[in-house]
Amino acid sequence: MMLGFDESEFLKQTASAVGLRPQIEDLVDKLTAKGFDNLFLIGAGGTYAAMWPYEHLAKRLSTMPVKSVIAAELLVTGDQTMTRNSVAIFTSVSGTTDDSLRAIDYCRERGVFVIAFTGYPESPIAEAADIALVSEPKTWPFDLQMLLFMTRLFHVRGEFAGYEKFADEFMNIPEILVEVARQAEPVASAFADAHKDTDYYFLVGGGNLWGFTYLYSMCILEEMQWLRTTRVHSAEFFHGSLELLEEGTSVILFQGEDETRALTDRVEKFVRKISKDVTVFDTKDYSLEGISPEFRGVIAPLVLDTVTGRVSKHLERVREHSLDLRRYYRVVEY
């Protein structure tokens, strides 16, 4: 039994997201046939950070200009590379995020083709977009849809030859992630029990896990648990942030299986010399049965989101602090 985990609902939600594959493929194929110049991945908070892995993937695989953008910043600075030949993707669990709504209006006014992934077909964001691809309500994370969209795009462009194999294997990801959650449950419980009174965390990740590191630090530990954090990219760790380490500093490292793994290994080797409280959440610890070795790295954010989902529920338990409790976010005017 997993704490606060509704397996049937989880399977229903994740299956609905990967079930969008035919629609995603059709959309990508039509957009590519028509032609577009660049792709904007626009979000706010967690949905912004969750776009970073796909900007990163584009840099590795493609010559297509792909840019992650903060919705609110776009509104005040603009972007001269955004034209009528641009495409923008937005994601929103609720479909109501104000910053994203205003950014959609900004894009539409400039003739940008807007795609929305959400769980509510009649939500403001779904209705404002040119096309909305809708999963079950409250489906998270959007890595499910974004992985299919981006890999299909690079496949059509001749930059990702393994798409069909990847997408076929990926259809089994709902069940694979349930197994990840089961395996992570005792690890998460033990971590939470050991950190009941920890009020400061140092989080490190790199490559396609940097956005996830930022997201878990800001949107979960800070927003949902009111804990203090420092977050730093593993490639930047030795340029300042290391000075904050002390013997009792709780350090969390997010480790994946792409070419940036060595950067986080280097950080781990150093922090273990200083801190007596180092935790590594590593995708290598999970079998991911049915996923070929060459694809394990690209799905790392999705795997660790499932692992830390278990951690979050157990922190909620030991700290008696609901993950839904807010003092300011969507509570007061700002």
Image (tube, rainbow, N blue to C red):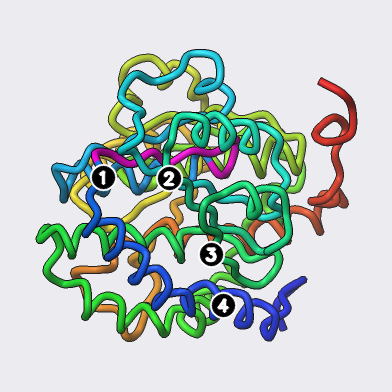
| Three-letter code, disc 1 | Phe
User: Helix, strand or loop at disc 3?
Assistant: strand
| Three-letter code, disc 3 | Leu
Quarter residue 284 falls in: bottom left
Mark 4–mark 1 CB contact (< 8 Å) = no
Q: Position of residue 205 (x, y in %)?
A: 39, 41
| Inter-mark Cα distance, 3 to 1 | 20 Å
| Inter-mark Cα distance, 4 to 2 | 24 Å
| Three-letter code, disc 2 | Phe
Seen from the viewer's position, the closer of residues 93 and 256 is 93
Find residue 329 and name its label. none
Look at mark 4 in the image and give the residue it sits on: 16
Seen from the viewer's position, the closer of residues 167 and 178 is 167
| Residue at horizontal 66 percent and vertical 72 percent from the top | 136
Residue 44 forms part of the magenta stretch: yes
Quarter residue 159 falls in: bottom left
Mark nearest the camera among 4 and 2 is 2
Quarter in which the N terminus is drawn: bottom right
Q: Earlier in the sequence, mark 4 or mark 2?
A: 4
Look at mark 3 in the image and give the residue it sits on: 133
| Residue at horizontal 35 percent and vertical 84 percent from the top | 289
| Inter-mark Cα distance, 4 to 3 | 10 Å
Q: Position of residue 181 (x, y in %)?
A: 56, 74
Q: Earlier in the sequence, mark 2 or mark 3?
A: 2
| Residue at horizontal 46 percent and vertical 66 percent from the top | 144
Look at mark 1 in the image and give the residue it sits on: 36
Packing grade of label 4 (10 A; few <14, some 14-19, many >=20) is: many
| Inter-mark Cα distance, 2 to 3 | 14 Å
Is 162 located above or below residue 330 in the figure?
below
| Residue at horizontal 52 percent and vertical 46 percent from the top | 90
Mark 1–mark 2 CB contact (< 8 Å) = yes
Packing grade of label 3 (10 A; few <14, some 14-19, many >=20) is: many
